[in-house]
Image (spheres, rainbow, N blue to C red):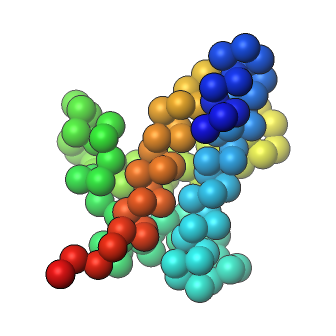
Amino acid sequence: RNLAVYAWFHYQLNVTAQLMGFVSVEYALKLKTGKSRASFKTLIEMAINEGWISDDGFTVAKHRNTPESSYVEVLARVMPSLRNGLAHGTRMLHHESVSSLQTCAEFINQLFKPAER
């Protein structure tokens, strides 16, 4: 979160902030599943199939105008490539670190939400 704040003053920190968010989601998935060697995409798909994450847990999903696929399905398709682009370099400019971090935080919070009684 602090990196995203500092990115206001030093633009390049947007990339690092977003990358740390995606890496944190991947690590949380590995903790939850116990599968340290599975791919990021496989882990996200597992979280969807197990019902650990859903569109209801993401703020941005409530404002989508494209209901042909669920938001979590889009995440499974897009998050690994975004993470790889940030980690290995890309020409894309990154200015959305705050919204990316919000999505990452909501993802992790859904994985570890307290059991309902």
The answer to whether residue 106 is seen in the rendering is yes
Q: Is residue 88 above or below residue 24?
A: above
Q: Is residue 29 above or below residue 60?
A: below
Q: Quadrant of the N terminus?
A: top right
Q: Residue at x 49, y 65 (%)?
A: 44
Residue at position x 22%, y 39% from top? 62
- Quadrant for the C terminus, please: bottom left
Query: Looking at the image, which residue is at 82% across and 44% down?
Result: 88
Compared with 31, 14 (above or below) is above
x and y percent of residue 72 in the render?
36, 54
Quadrant in the rendering for residue 5: top right
Taking the spot 55% from the left edge, 70% from the top edge, the residue there is 29
Q: Percent from the top left, x then y, of residue 6? A: 70, 24
The x, y position of residue 2, in whole percent, is 66, 34
> Which residue appears farthest toward the left when viewing the image?
117
The residue furthest right is 88
Which image quadrant is residue 23 in? bottom right
Number of dots carrying numbers: 0
